[in-house]
Amino acid sequence: MSETAVDPEAVEHVAELARVDLTPDERERFAAQFAEILDSFEALDEVPAVEGEPDLVNVLRTDEVSEGLTQEEALSNAPATEDGYFEGPPVG
């Protein structure tokens, strides 16, 4: 549990600033949830730091120009075409 536990009064204060009405049960529940969130952040502090820079490897390939599809080939499987373009449903 976090050393700086969030109490229901703190939750109520934040709720008032946000102009949100909370029931007493919600204040208790949110206080417990905030405490869990803070504990999760504290757990991150325990993760050891990585020493040194990782080796970077270029995974990109060199661009190569190659033949593409012709307009007719690209449109050959389209459900609808008009004047050499894909035809889609009207927008609006």
Image: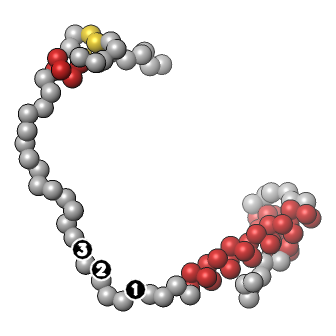
Residue identifier under label 2: 54
Residue at x 44% of width, y 87% of height? 49
Residue at x 79% of width, y 58% of height? 19
Q: Is residue 31 visible?
A: yes
26 horizontally vs 4: left or right: right
Residue 56 tag number = 3
- Residue type at the position of mark 1: Val
Residue at x 11% of width, y 55% of height? 62
Tell me whether circle 1 and circle 2 mark residues in contact (CB < 8 Å).
Answer: yes
Q: Quadrant of residue 36?
A: bottom right
Q: Identify the secondary structure beneath mark 3.
A: loop
Q: Quadrant of the N terminus?
A: bottom right
Q: Identify the secondary structure beneath mark 2.
A: loop
- Residue type at the position of mark 2: Pro
Q: Residue 21 placed where, x, y %?
A: 85, 57
Residue 50 tag number = 1
Q: Identify the secondary structure beneath mark 1.
A: loop
| Residues at marks 3 and 1, CA–CA distance in whole angstroms | 15 Å
Q: Residue 34 placed where, x, y %?
A: 74, 72
Q: Earlier in the sequence, mark 3 or mark 1?
A: 1
- Residue type at the position of mark 3: Leu
| Residues at marks 2 and 3, CA–CA distance in whole angstroms | 6 Å
Closest to the observer, 83 or 59? 59
Q: Residue 65 placed where, x, y %?
A: 7, 42
Closest to the observer, 40 or 13? 40
